[in-house]
Image (tube, rainbow, N blue to C red):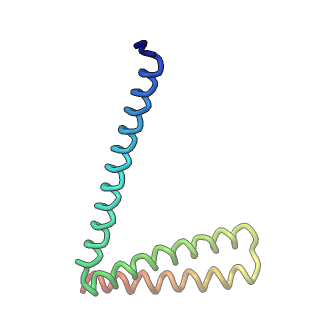
Amino acid sequence: MRINYLKLYLCLTFTGITVYLFIQAYHYSIIIYQDENAVISSSLKQTPHEKNRKRILNSTEINDEICTFWRVEHYIEPNEGSKAFMYAACELAARLNSQSAKDSFN
């Protein structure tokens, strides 16, 4: 009986690579599953006050970005439309920032 060592080597190599990739994919799926559970459990632990505070902080960041955008637009092309949008966006951002500051002290 004659053994073809090249075929044996290739077969064992591909088998080893397949097993290695399967193990890596399994560990990766476990890590993702644990991360999803951590996110879900952390969101369940938040009180309604914490959720509201997080929502307000997120909205203040977004409104600050909108205010900055309109300030830049008004600087690039100063016209009445961009000026009105800038004032409205910056006024809203200032109002929400003062509200979030009051909530953080309570």
Query: In percent of the image, x 30 and y 72: which residue is there?
Result: 40
* Horizontal and vertical percent position of residue 62: 50, 75
Question: In which quadrant is the C terminus drawn?
Answer: bottom left
- Decide which of 76, 30 is in the foreground and name it: 30
Query: In percent of the image, x 58 and y 82: which residue is there?
Result: 89
- Decide which of 56, 46 is in the foreground and name it: 46
* Horizontal and vertical percent position of residue 9: 42, 21
User: Given the current orientation, which residue lies at the most extreme front position?
Assistant: 1
Q: Is residue 43 above or below residue 99?
A: above
In the figure, is residue 77 to the left or right of 7?
right
* Horizontal and vertical percent position of residue 32: 35, 58
Q: How many marks?
A: 0
- Decide which of 3, 28 is in the foreground and name it: 3
**In which quadrant of the rendered view does residue 75 lie?**
bottom right
User: Given the current orientation, which residue lies at the most extreme top position?
Assistant: 2
Query: In percent of the image, x 71 and y 79: which residue is there?
Result: 82
Query: In percent of the image, x 31 and y 55: which residue is there?
Result: 31
**In which quadrant of the rendered view does residue 66 lie?**
bottom right
Question: In which quadrant is the N terminus drawn?
Answer: top left
Q: Is residue 23 above or below residue 30?
A: above
In the figure, is residue 90 to the left or right of 11?
right
Q: Is residue 27 above or below residue 17?
A: below
In the figure, is residue 83 to the left or right of 8?
right
